[in-house]
Image (spheres, rainbow, N blue to C red):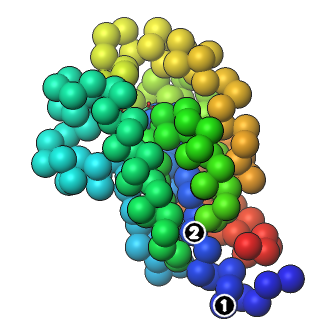
Amino acid sequence: MHQESEIQHSNIILVGMMGTGKTTVGTLLAGMLDYPLVDMDTLIAEREGISVQEIFRTRGEPYFRDLESQVLEEVLSRKGQIISTGGGCVLRAGNCSIMLEKGLVVALTADADHIVNRVSGDNNRPLLAGDTRQRVQSIMEERKDVYRFAHVTVDTSLLTPEEVASHVLTRYRVQAF
Ligand code: S3P
């Protein structure tokens, strides 16, 4: 069993589909643990000086994915952070391996209805442009297995963000990382 001080230094890495609450729960966890919140999409957008949507539009998804892997590696060279990843960050096996090594990986899931409700009216997600329900269902189908590698999975459909955060915190404290 590791000492509490060691546990406190490892990262909590939130993965999951768009609309599962990674950033909301990440913000709560950051407050509870007094850790910085690193939102990968925000960092990528700051780095490029344009929004994620603009990166997709003008430079294309492969460019975004390369940048995402690069930024992930940089972020994970540090400890004691709550990291909210973009929903597609798990699409590269290399990203998943480094996440598993560098922290507690928590997958947030939700059913399609809850995801559609949460992302409706938000125009910042290029992959959901068009018929939101149809896009959510098709991406969920494509990605149905990709979040399974996580150490912990929490279905957020019927939980408040506070309940999800407190569940994650409990798992973080009992897990010796
Ligand atoms: C994506 C999710 C987005 C963002 C980009 C691509 C995806 O992040 O990285 O639009 O492929 O699922 P959120 O999950 O934070 O919305």
Which numbered disc flags the more N-terminal residue, 2 or 1? Answer: 1
Q: Is mark 2 on a helix, strand or loop?
A: strand
Query: Which numbered circle lies on residue 66?
Result: none
Identify the residue at horizontal 70%, vertical 48% (top origin): 150
Q: Quick check: 159 above or below 56? A: below
Which residue, given by chain and number where applicable, does mark 2 sit on? 11
Would you say residue 158 is visible in this rendering?
Answer: no
Of the four image quadrants, the one with ligand 1 is top left
Q: Where is residue 133 in the image (x, y as percent from the top left)?
A: 45, 13
Crowding at label 1, few (<14), some or many (≥20) Cα neighbours within 10 Å? few
Q: Quick check: 114 above or below 169? A: above
Judge by depth and name the residue closer to the eye, 49 or 157.
Answer: 49
Please indicate whether residue 138 sits to the left or right of residue 68 in the image.
Answer: right
Mark 2 and mark 1 residues within 8 Å of each other at the beta carbon: no
Which residue, given by chain and number where applicable, does mark 1 sit on? 5
**Residue lying farthest right?**
1
Please indicate whether residue 27 sits to the left or right of residue 43 in the image.
Answer: right
Label 1 residue near ligand 1, CB within 8 Å: no
Q: Position of residue 6 (x, y in %)?
A: 68, 85
Crowding at label 2, few (<14), some or many (≥20) Cα neighbours within 10 Å? many
Q: Quick check: 161 above or below 173? A: above
Q: Tell me which corner region of the image, top left, top right, bottom left or bottom right, holds residue 156.
A: top right
How far apart in space, not on screen, are marks 2 and 1 (Cα)? 13 Å
User: What's under tag 2, amino acid-wise?
Assistant: Asn
Identify the residue at horizontal 31%, vertical 10% (top origin): 130
Q: What element carries label 1?
A: helix
Q: Position of residue 49 (x, y in %)?
A: 13, 48
User: What's under tag 1, amino acid-wise?
Assistant: Ser
